[in-house]
Amino acid sequence: MVIKCGTESEKEISYRCVQCGFSVTTLYIQYSPGNIRLMKCGNCKAVADEYIECELMILVIDLILHKIKAYRHLFYNRFSRETLHNEVLLWKLSLGFLILDAYQMLAVCTTQDERSLPASFALFLGLCGKVLMGVFFGNLMFLGIILFGTRKFLNAKIGDSRCKHILLSILVSSYFKIFVIAMMVWEFPSSVVSIIKMFVLSSNALALLVITDAVMIRCIWICFAAHAMKFLVTQGLGAYQKLVLW
């Protein structure tokens, strides 16, 4: 695995020590191909980023275990400035996020009869409209509360680049949603979706903590409020549509 180290012409790019979060300018020095020396942090005197020499699977396991140093490596040392400004990547991640969210809503907010093949095309359109409206307005409120809470309670400046960084961190830290794909193949109780939501919430809070360097409890409350509002919006829209159809 190769990560570009900081040079004198790239000092605006802030790498971080995965142990203490202190800014570092260089992650490693390469003497020859395959021969590198990891740099130490000037604050804690530990190796700044041990994941440079680790396999990708080690990073994935540590992310699942919610190790903060794995999140620091991912959001500061692996994602470059070009990644943050890659509009195509953001759109792809957003599309995948919304598709998984739509299936999750379909599994939780609809009955078995509704998920079966609709008797008419009108019922099919009604089901699609219910899911799409829930996904759109639910995630709109979710992202709005994340950005508002970050600015209001975490005292973080929200600019264009900052918004992209926060959006990217929320999308990537929602990787637990990928387990929803298993529900397309095997039958699972609805409680599994609740467990996935809990893991997504905790992962979002840890990502927000790493991005903003704020207090953990505030990050948890902001993410909890965002997820709660998203749930209330989707439930409210579902109840409203049932009332209108009735």
Image (spheres, rainbow, N blue to C red):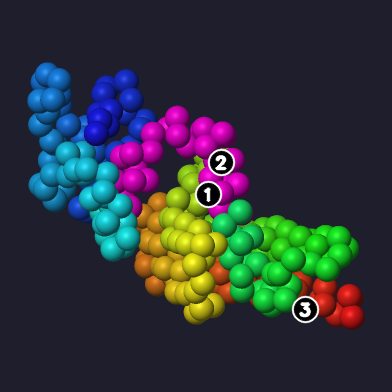
Q: Residues within 10 Å of mark 2 (few under 14, many from 20)?
A: few
Q: Which mark's residue is nearer the viewer, 1 or 3?
A: 3
Q: Which mark's residue is nearer the viewer, 1 or 2?
A: 2
How far apart marks 3 and 2 lie (CA) works out to 31 Å
Asked if residue 217 can be seen in this view, the reply is yes
Which amino acid, mark 1? Leu
Which amino acid, mark 3? Ala
Asked if residue 224 can be seen in this view, the reply is no
- Residue 92 — which label? 2
Sequence-first disc among 1 and 2: 2
Q: Which residues are magenta?
A: 71-98
Q: Residue at x 20, y 53 (%)?
A: 19
Q: Position of residue 101 (x, y in %)?
A: 59, 60
Q: Which residue is mark 1?
A: 167
- Residue 239 — which label? 3
Q: Quadrant of the N terminus?
A: top left
Which amino acid, mark 2? Lys
Q: Determine whether the residue tagged by mark 1 lies in a helix, strand or loop.
A: helix
Between 126 and 211, the one lying in front of the other is: 126
Q: Residue at x 34, y 46 (%)?
A: 74
Q: Residue at x 36, y 55 (%)?
A: 210
Count of residue discs: 3
